[in-house]
Image (cartoon, rainbow, N blue to C red):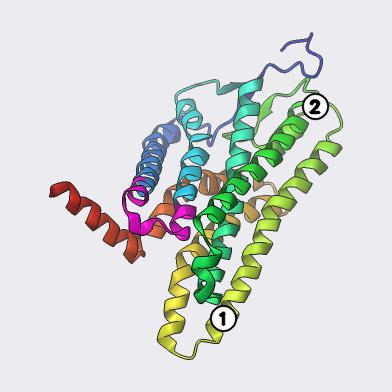
Amino acid sequence: MEGDRNHSSVAVFVLLGITDEKELQVALFPVFLGIYLVTIVWNLALIILIKMDSRLHTPMYIFLSSLSFIDICYSSSTSPKMLSDFFKDEKNISFISCAIQYFATSWMGQVECCLLAAMAYDRYVAIGRPLQYSSIMVPGLCWKMVAGALGTGLLSSLVEAVSCFTLDYCGPNVIQHFFCNVSEIIILSCSSPFITQMTVFLFILFVGFGSLVVILLSYGFIAASILKISSVKGSAKAFNTCASHLAVVTLFYGTVLSVYMHPNSRHSEQQDKVLSVFYVIIIPMLNPLIYSLRNKEIREAFRRVTKRQYI
């Protein structure tokens, strides 16, 4: 503790981690290490594949490579610290490090929301306005949408982090989580957190739920366009173009909403940890798998790239 600081006397926070059972920690370490390594390798391989194959230089794959990069950063904002904490009796994190971790995690999470919304709009244009698709979704617009997602997430997470970590922390310093989660940090403040809570809520509402509204509207228009297709084969083909994205959206928003929208209960803390593991650590690993395994273009691009290596 530091008593001479203007805003905070807490120098270190203590993370409780996923579990306090030593045997379970030893068993979980190789599991989460494997998940993290697969996340890095698979997402990085997808980025390199899209970069190397010119046929994948299309709007959908611009967004997909950007999503893979964000997933690497998203997982890396929490996984290394969590893995190192498995072997520590005291899972300490400095005040500044906690602020940086929260900022990075919040930034990547909100960028992911915006990218999923951009990808939903891309699928709507591809299905609803196929003749104008190439003239609407030009590469320049796609990169501007990616930059807009990064900028929106950056501004929102910066405001949230500043408002959260300028509160007074003068007593309790135990965070009931495995990473610096805003809802667990704010309740430790010894000053009134109301303004900070409202600030975080409004920004998350604007970015997270705003992106969800765009996604829902896009899929509403997609459904209307599919219903207008007379042939069953054409309808199935149109649906398959957005099936992977729909699965990713369902997984991501389903777990996030489960964490932040369920009523409090005696078991909510452990449930929150499990669900947070899913959307912060497991989903970044699943995203490239979902997009690659069912994607014929990705498989063909992989064959072309590997064939060139042996020629």
Q: How far across and how far down the image is residue 115, in percent?
A: 57, 53
Q: Which residue is mark 1?
A: 225
Q: How far across and how far down the image is residue 63, in percent?
A: 49, 54
Number of residue marks: 2
Give the residue type that dot 2 points to: Leu
Q: Nearer the viewer, residue 8 or 14?
A: 8
Give the residue type that dot 1 points to: Ser
Q: Nearer the viewer, residue 276 or 200?
A: 200
Q: Is residue 55 magenta?
A: yes
Left or right of residue 163, residue 88 in this image: left
* Above or below, 128 relative to 151: below
**What span is colored magenta in the figure?**
48-64
Q: Main secondary structure of the magenta part?
A: helix
Query: Which residue, as the protein is rendered here, is positioned at the far left?
Result: 311
Left or right of residue 211, residue 310 in this image: left
Q: Residues within 10 Å of mark 2 (few under 14, many from 20)?
A: some
Q: Is residue 175 magenta?
A: no
Kindly report the distance in space between the C-alpha atoms of the residues bearing marks 2 and 1: 50 Å
Q: Which residue is mark 2?
A: 167
Please, what secondary structure does the residue beneath circle 1 have?
Answer: helix
Observer-side mark, 2 or 1, equals: 1
Q: Residues within 10 Å of mark 1 (few under 14, many from 20)?
A: some
Query: Which residue, as the protein is rendered here, is positioned at the far front?
Result: 135
